[in-house]
Each structure stands twice: as C-alpha cells, then as structure tokens.
Image: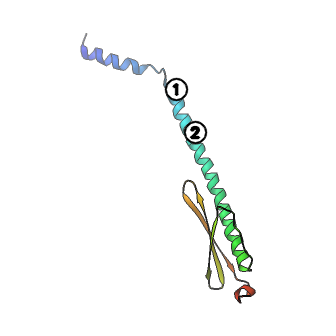
C-alpha cells in the first residue's frame, strides 16, 4: 500500500465522523444568543436613558424659564446658557456602552425672569 495514500486515509477518516459537532454548534449558538441578549438589554437601557435625558432637559428648560429651581435625577447633569430670549439647557447622563447621552432644550424666558425679578 502506498504510504501517502495510507496517511491521507488516516487524515480523512476522522473528518467523516461528525461526532462532537453538535456540542460545538451548541456552544457557538449559545454564545451568539448571549451576545445578542446582552446587546438587546443594553439597547433598551440606552433608549430609557435617552428618554430620561430628553425629559429632564425639557423640564429643566421650562422650570428655569419661569424662575423655578429644578432638581434633576441623580445621574443626570444639567447645564444652562442663554441664547437671546431663550434659555438653552443641555442634559447629559452616562451610559455603559457608548459613554454618554445628551439632549438639549430651548424655552423662551418669561417676562418676570427676563427682567430679573
């Protein structure tokens, strides 16, 4: 018998056997499912934080425009500035995957606030 052919048969015969392939496929599928699940949960968290930041920016702009103090949630930071007759409020909050989420809101100043009263 040809030694090359014998060596080739010894190499090919184990490849024909699919024993253990189900375990490998299950491990890959399980890893993929865990990754997709983690990304979905992170996406929902990012969306919730975005909604909270947008709401906080709008509420802060409204309350500061009429001269009322606003206390945002603990994880949201508020900065304000004036842009003509409008107040600009920017709210930011940390997010796990992308770093931070921010939103801006503009609101016209009330007359009493604009006159410094």
**Residue drawn 71% across and 79% down?**
65
Which label number is shown at residue 62? none
* Residue 80 sits in quarter: bottom right
Relative vertical location of residue 74 with respect to residue 1 in this rendering, above or below? below
Question: The C terminus is located in which quarter?
Answer: bottom right
> Residue 8: percent from the left, percent from the top?
31, 19
> Residue 110: percent from the left, percent from the top?
73, 84
The residue sitting at the top extreme is: 1
Whether residue 79 sits left or right of residue 71 in the image: it is left
Dot 1 crowding, Cα within 10 Å, few <14, some 14–19, many 20+: few
Q: Earlier in the sequence, mark 2 or mark 1?
A: 1
**Element assignment for label 2:** helix
Nearest to the observer: residue 94 or residue 51: 94
Residue matched to label 1: 23
Relative vertical location of residue 29 with respect to residue 111 in this rendering, above or below? above
**Residue drawn 42% across and 20% down?**
16
> Residue 21: percent from the left, percent from the top?
49, 25
Whether residue 69 sits left or right of residue 30 in the image: it is right
Dot 2 crowding, Cα within 10 Å, few <14, some 14–19, many 20+: few
**Residue drawn 71% across and 69% down?**
71
Nearest to the observer: residue 12 or residue 86: 86
Which label number is shown at residue 33? 2
> Residue 24: percent from the left, percent from the top?
50, 28
Whether residue 13 sits left or right of residue 85 in the image: it is left
């Amino acid at each position: 018998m040809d030694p090359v052919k014998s060596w080739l048969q010894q190499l090919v015969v184990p490849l024909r056997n699919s024993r253990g392939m189900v375990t490998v496929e299950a491990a890959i599928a399980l890893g993929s499912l865990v990754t997709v699940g983690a990304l979905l949960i992170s996406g929902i968290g990012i969306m919730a934080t975005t909604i909270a930041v947008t709401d906080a920016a709008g509420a802060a702009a409204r309350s500061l425009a009429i001269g009322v103090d606003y206390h945002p949630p603990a994880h949201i930071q508020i900065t304000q500035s004036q842009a003509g007759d409008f107040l600009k409020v920017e709210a930011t909050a940390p997010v796990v995957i992308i770093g931070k989420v921010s939103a801006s809101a503009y609101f016209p100043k009330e007359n009493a606030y604009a006159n410094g009263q």
